[in-house]
């Protein structure tokens, strides 16, 4: 009876990794929570329908002389362009280290944040299938000989669902918060006691060793390379700390970062306001990370994703409701960059689906599958995305 | 009964102690309420009973253990369900200085007026957070407070959005606390008419000329039917049309509910196969009546309650029985909860304590005194500052979502035991004197029994003591370090 009532310790490493390979790139996964309005991020300025559907929220064409230059779309390829608040990404784009995949997403059409995020983080089509996350399964199926407690880190107060699996992951809000305090003598006593009560507990042992590792790192005194300036935001700090961990060579293979606030039903703003501020934070953060990590780009791949897109037409509250097709960005030294990938069906009636939403032409797992196979050295995509056969789309060189 | 070494290491069990510290009590009221040491010693508890009591309280105090031992599980549940018969005068007295809890929208808006000098937007929300923690700590109506927490997650409102920062105080009182152990129908009804909810989910922007489906969707997906409850995108859009005009006053009587006829869509609607004839405000009310008695709702709520009290993945038979009870009682929350507790607790599986539960259980078991203010920062770092979850699904109730963030828990454990948390005190030695001889080994046994239900196996206990002493700790430090490490240990993270 006693044993029944006691917590059964979560089994870890319950199956041996099925593949052995040297570790590949460090993967940074940025999740835009709330369904980002990607049509205002990578703007299809070559589509008349876009401007008809978004009379107020639409971002002016690059050559629209009736508006101020700084409010116009920044052209990328004659058809798509970046929101002006995202123009800091131009450098990465021009150096062909940034690829954009438009009309990208998941088959799920629930238009529910929670269901869509859950399915996407698990990398599955429906409720059936493994409860663990796609990144967790990637780590569990690949033995890279790396036993670092910092192999996978979720930036924030708790690890992302995508990281859950049979490998321990760590949540990290701030490197600076990660200490027990007290004088050296007291610290030694605490450490001894914790070491005893966590003797057979992987998560506790991870936390203890991480404590030791992080003692030497301080984000406040960190100097980024190439004068890169991270935004003074939660997102900026998360990227900066990711950069610090990579440079400190602590064994980081995956860093998962969340950026919230994208559920813009109301007054989202076109060139100024709520969502433009989020875009600036996102783009400036990525641009700083790209500059700071420029010398590491051959071993680094960064992906942005969101659970779905938003309706093609604006709603009556100067916002947008839940839609379908989204957009992903891939940043790294080995991407086929400077290009908008993916088939674009258009925004006219008959081209949109459901209540008027962008159709998905590239499954998000095609993008992730290609990264996993080509950059992370893991052939087990069928374990990672059960029931789905990712197609290679030529996003990576 | 003792825990074997293996159990101890696997689970993490621990102990600590506390007591009123006469000389540095933060305030007389807290002392009066909680400062008195338990009048009887505590004894080890049967593991299943300890687990049950951990589900029925935010971590059992000695008095609650004693009461449970006296009357048994079934009577204890009935006593807690009849919450309004429990004399909670001391806790009410403690809360009496919290004026904002009783204010109506007008008064709250008045003191939240941003034109005032020294205006502090955090004042009203922080009073609500503080009061919530104090009630969870000190109320004798523990099951009721657990249900308040449950519904606060279910009908989550992010206090930082719009006027939610002061309207949530009204929602907390008039929606959540008023109906926490009442009728589910009344709860949904009150929530739907709650300005804080309508603003949080954008329904004030839902107009005939441009519908906004945010609230309509969450009302079905998160509040009643559940995501797989059988509604379609079309149903969401039609319910949004019914809800056009459900709004919040903006000028006079700012923050009160209002139905705005002029922006209401007067056409016919069809929701879940039912045609809704034009009837103004009554249209959405008719849908609500349909939603709250829907079998999908009964199942969704039963499942969520069972996940809260019994297991992350509760037994299907239990959910089935609770669902039937929900349907036959038209959503009487007490009746459903009675089934889940009586039938479910014997089958309960370990649940990882959410951050607030972790903090509250340490404070309650140690008989600590606190004004709760300093707890907010710990909760923020652990990821569960109240009314601060941005998305409408509320804080997760699944164990796996909370594991892997041990550091702030460890920090709390050590800072609590060292009495370093502002206006928070315990008196470990005085507390342990009630149940221990004062010999270190006995102290550790009493502590483990208090925190984990039973003492740790002797060999493990002695090894723990030896390891801490070998690190140079004095006998007094040794007890403190062990107390903190028991609170920090794996076993104490589970309830």
Image: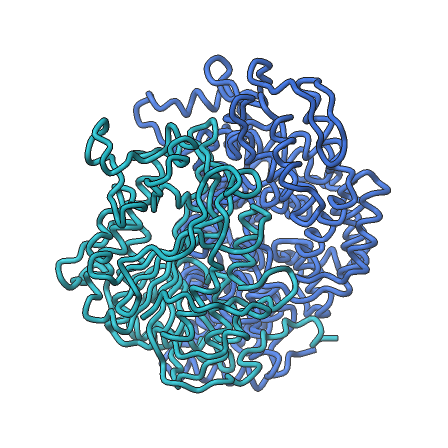
Viewer-side residue, A159 vs B346: A159
Compared across the picture, whether B305 is left or right of A164 comes to right
Residue A43 placed where, x, y %? 34, 43
- Residue B231 falls in image quadrant: top right
Viewer-side residue, A210 vs A188: A210
Q: Residue at x 53, y 70 (%)?
A: A389
Q: Residue at x 46, y 76 (%)?
A: A139
Chain letter for the cyan part? A
Task: Quarter of the image for the N terminus of chain A: give it.
Answer: bottom right
Q: Chain B hue?
A: blue
Q: Residue at x 36, y 80 (%)?
A: A23
Q: Residue at x 51, y 34 (%)?
A: B200
Residue A173 placed where, x, y %? 37, 59
Task: Quarter of the image for the C terminus of chain A: give it.
Answer: bottom left
Placement of B115 over or under A250, stated as above or below = above
Residue that lies at the very extreme toward the right in this rendered image? B328
């Amino acid at each position: 009876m006693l044993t029944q009532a006691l917590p059964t310790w979560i089994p870890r490493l319950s199956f041996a990794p099925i593949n052995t390979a040297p570790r590949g790139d460090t993967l940074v996964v940025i999740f835009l929570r709330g369904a980002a309005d990607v049509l205002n991020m990578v703007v299809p300025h070559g589509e008349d329908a876009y401007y008809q559907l978004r009379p107020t929220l639409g971002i002016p064409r690059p050559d629209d002389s009736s508006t101020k230059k700084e409010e116009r779309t920044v052209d990328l390829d004659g058809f798509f362009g970046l929101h002006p608040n995202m123009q800091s990404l131009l450098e990465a784009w021009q150096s062909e280290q940034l690829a954009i995949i438009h009309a990208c997403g998941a088959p799920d059409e629930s238009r529910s944040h929670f269901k869509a995020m859950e399915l996407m983080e698990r990398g599955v089509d429906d409720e059936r299938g493994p409860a663990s996350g796609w990144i967790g399964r990637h780590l569990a199926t690949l033995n890279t000989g790396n036993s670092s407690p910092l192999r996978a880190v979720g930036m924030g107060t708790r690890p992302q669902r995508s990281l859950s699996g049979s490998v321990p992951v760590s949540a990290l809000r701030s490197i600076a918060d990660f200490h027990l305090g007290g004088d050296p003598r007291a610290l030694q006593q605490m450490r001894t006691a914790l070491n005893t009560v966590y003797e057979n507990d992987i998560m506790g042992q991870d936390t203890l060793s991480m404590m030791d590792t992080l003692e030497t790192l301080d984000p406040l005194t960190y100097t980024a390379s190439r004068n890169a300036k991270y935004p003074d935001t939660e997102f900026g700090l998360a990227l900066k700390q990711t950069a610090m961990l990579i440079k400190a060579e602590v064994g980081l293979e995956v860093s998962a970062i969340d950026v919230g606030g994208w559920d813009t039903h109301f007054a989202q703003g076109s060139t100024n306001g709520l969502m433009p501020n989020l875009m600036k934070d996102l783009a400036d953060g990525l641009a700083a990370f790209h500059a700071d990590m420029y010398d590491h780009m051959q071993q680094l791949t960064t992906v942005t994703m969101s659970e779905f897109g938003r309706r093609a037409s604006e709603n009556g509250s100067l916002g947008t409701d839940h839609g379908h097709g989204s957009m992903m960005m891939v940043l790294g030294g080995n991407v086929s960059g400077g290009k908008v990938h993916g088939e674009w069906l258009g925004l006219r009636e008959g081209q949109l689906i459901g209540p008027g939403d962008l159709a998905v032409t590239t499954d998000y797992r095609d993008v992730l599958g290609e990264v996993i196979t080509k950059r992370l050295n893991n052939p087990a995509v069928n374990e990672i995305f059960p029931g789905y056969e990712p197609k290679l789309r030529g996003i990576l060189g | 009964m003792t825990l074997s070494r293996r159990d101890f290491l696997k689970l993490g069990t621990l102990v600590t102690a506390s007591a009123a510290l006469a000389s540095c009590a933060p305030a007389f009221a807290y002392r009066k309420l909680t400062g008195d040491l338990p009048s009887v010693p505590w004894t080890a508890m049967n593991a299943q009973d300890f687990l049950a009591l951990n589900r029925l309280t935010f971590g059992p105090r000695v008095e609650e253990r004693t009461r449970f031992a006296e009357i048994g599980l079934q009577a204890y549940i009935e006593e807690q369900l009849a919450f309004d018969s429990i004399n909670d005068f001391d806790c009410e007295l403690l809360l009496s200085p919290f004026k904002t809890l009783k204010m109506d929208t007008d008064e709250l808006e008045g003191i939240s007026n941003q034109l005032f000098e020294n205006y502090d937007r955090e004042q009203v929300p922080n009073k609500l957070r503080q009061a919530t923690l104090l009630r969870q700590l000190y109320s004798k109506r523990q099951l009721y407070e657990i249900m308040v927490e449950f519904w606060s997650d279910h009908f989550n409102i992010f206090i930082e959005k719009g006027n939610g920062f002061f309207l949530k105080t009204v929602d907390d009182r008039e929606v959540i606390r008023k109906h926490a152990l009442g009728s589910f129908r009344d709860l949904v009804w009150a929530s739907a008419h709650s300005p804080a909810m309508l603003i949080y989910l954008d329904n004030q922007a839902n107009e005939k000329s441009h519908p906004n489906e945010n609230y309509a969707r969450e009302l079905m997906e998160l509040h009643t039917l559940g995501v797989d409850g059988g509604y379609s995108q079309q149903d969401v859009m039609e319910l949004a049309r019914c809800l056009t005009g459900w709004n919040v006053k903006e000028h006079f009587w700012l923050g009160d509910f209002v139905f705005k006829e002029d922006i209401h869509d007067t056409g016919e609607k069809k929701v879940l196969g039912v045609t809704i004839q034009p009837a103004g405000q009554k249209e959405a009310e008719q849908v609500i009546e349909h939603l709250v008695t829907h079998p999908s709702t009964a199942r969704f709520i039963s499942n969520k309650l069972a996940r809260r009290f019994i297991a992350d993945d509760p037994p299907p038979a239990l959910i089935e029985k609770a669902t039937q009870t929900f349907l036959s009682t038209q959503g009487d929350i007490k009746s459903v909860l009675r089934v889940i507790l009586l039938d479910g607790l014997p089958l309960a599986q370990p649940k990882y304590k959410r951050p607030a539960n972790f903090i509250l259980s340490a404070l309650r078991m140690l008989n600590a005194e606190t004004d709760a203010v300093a707890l907010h920062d710990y909760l923020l770092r652990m990821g569960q500052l109240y009314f601060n979850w941005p998305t409408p699904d509320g804080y997760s109730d699944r164990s796996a979502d909370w594991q892997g963030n041990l550091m702030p828990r460890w920090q709390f454990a050590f800072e609590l035991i060292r009495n370093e948390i502002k206006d928070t005190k315990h008196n470990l030695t005085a507390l342990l004197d009630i149940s221990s001889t004062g010999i270190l080994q006995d102290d550790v046994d009493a502590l483990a029994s208090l925190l984990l239900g039973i003492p740790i196996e002797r060999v493990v206990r002695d090894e723990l003591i030896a390891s801490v002493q070998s690190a140079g700790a004095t006998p007094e430090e040794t007890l403190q370090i062990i107390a903190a490490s028991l609170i920090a240990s794996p076993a104490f993270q589970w309830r």
